[in-house]
Amino acid sequence: MSFTRAADELCISQAAVSHQIKTLEDALQIKLFKRMTRAITLTAEGAILQRSLVDAFGRIDRVLAQLAQGEGRARKRLTVAVTPAFSSRWLVHRLDRFLAAHSQLEVRLVHTVMHTDLGRDSIDLAIRWGDGKWPGVECERLFGTELLPVCSPAMLKDGPPLLEPSDLAHYTLLHEDSCDDWERWFEQAGLAPSLALRGPLIDDSNALMQAALNGQGIALGRMALIRDDLRRGTLVSPFSQTLSTQGAYYMCWRPTRTEQEALTWFSDFLRNEAREQEAVVLEESFTTV
């Protein structure tokens, strides 16, 4: 509850911390802090986001702490670049199974939304979203995912009924990067794509889903990353109509890399988890509201 102490811990200026918070609040279109004369405190929305991030980063910290507990033997290291959303909503939930089988391996997760230079940044493996056509790297497709309209169940309690896709005109739409996905969803439903041209644009899928969880609107969520939320009921879908994506998650590595046992272990683990997920998708279904 102090920008000054946060700045000291991060070794940056207090102004830089304040600027980053303001940027985040602008992106989410919510206030995270109440600013008073000599103190700050979290808003209700800020408290919700804080709990979610503490939980996600806590799981990551616990996993990495387990890796750091050496037993006096040489440890192999694997550095993996991954987006925050893929890490917190898919990878971290599965990582303990890999670590249990390879306790001698030290895994370092580097979180970024940018495409890192695998050679320059000493990254052994990157997991990227896109079409798999990136210069200078070799790629292998892990899995694709469909998009599903989702929102907080609390948001629908007092709102207008959602019986037909056209009823979405009464709700705020949340967009990732652009309105394109919602435009295609409306067109697929037989409605005018122009219905999608409203609502905030959010350039991070983690922030997008947090806005949906907060009851700020309805988002098109990536099914592969939101299944736990759907099972728990923290997110619900007003309609069962899904939208096929034009991208997928890929494993990427340097073409000139030398063969590493650790990289083979981890890529095999990711392939197996992706196959198991595909098998579950064929069996499960989610109830719409």
Image: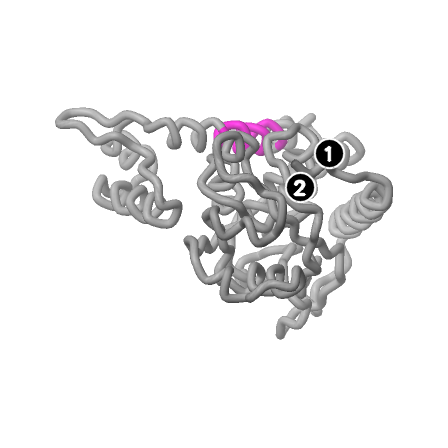
Q: CA distance from mark 2 to mark 1?
A: 15 Å
- For label 2, count other residues whose C-alpha is less than 10 Å away and answer few (under 14), some (14-19) or many (20+): some
- Residue type (three-letter) at the residue carrying disc 2: Trp
Residue at the location (80% across, 44% down)? 277
129 w.r.t. 278: above or below:
below
212 w.r.t. 34: above or below:
below
Q: Quick one: SS at disc 1?
A: helix
- Identify the residue position indicated by label 2 in the image: 90
Q: Which mark is residue 88?
A: none
- Residue type (three-letter) at the residue carrying disc 1: Leu
User: In which quadrant will I find the N terminus?
Assistant: top left
180 part of magenta stretch:
no
Residue at the location (44% across, 29% down)? 48
Q: Foreground residue, 85 or 261? A: 85
253 w.r.t. 69: above or below:
below
- Identify the residue position indicated by label 1 in the image: 99
Q: Is residue 177 left or right of residue 107?
A: left
Residue at the location (81% across, 50% down)? 271
**Looking at the image, which residue sits at the far bottom?**
135
Q: Main secondary structure of the magenta part?
A: helix
Q: Is residue 107 visible?
A: no
Q: Is residue 277 left or right of residue 75?
A: right
The answer to which quarter of the image holds residue 131 is bottom right
**Pointers 2 and 1 in contact (C-beta within 8 Å):** no
Q: Position of residue 105 (x, y in %)?
A: 71, 38
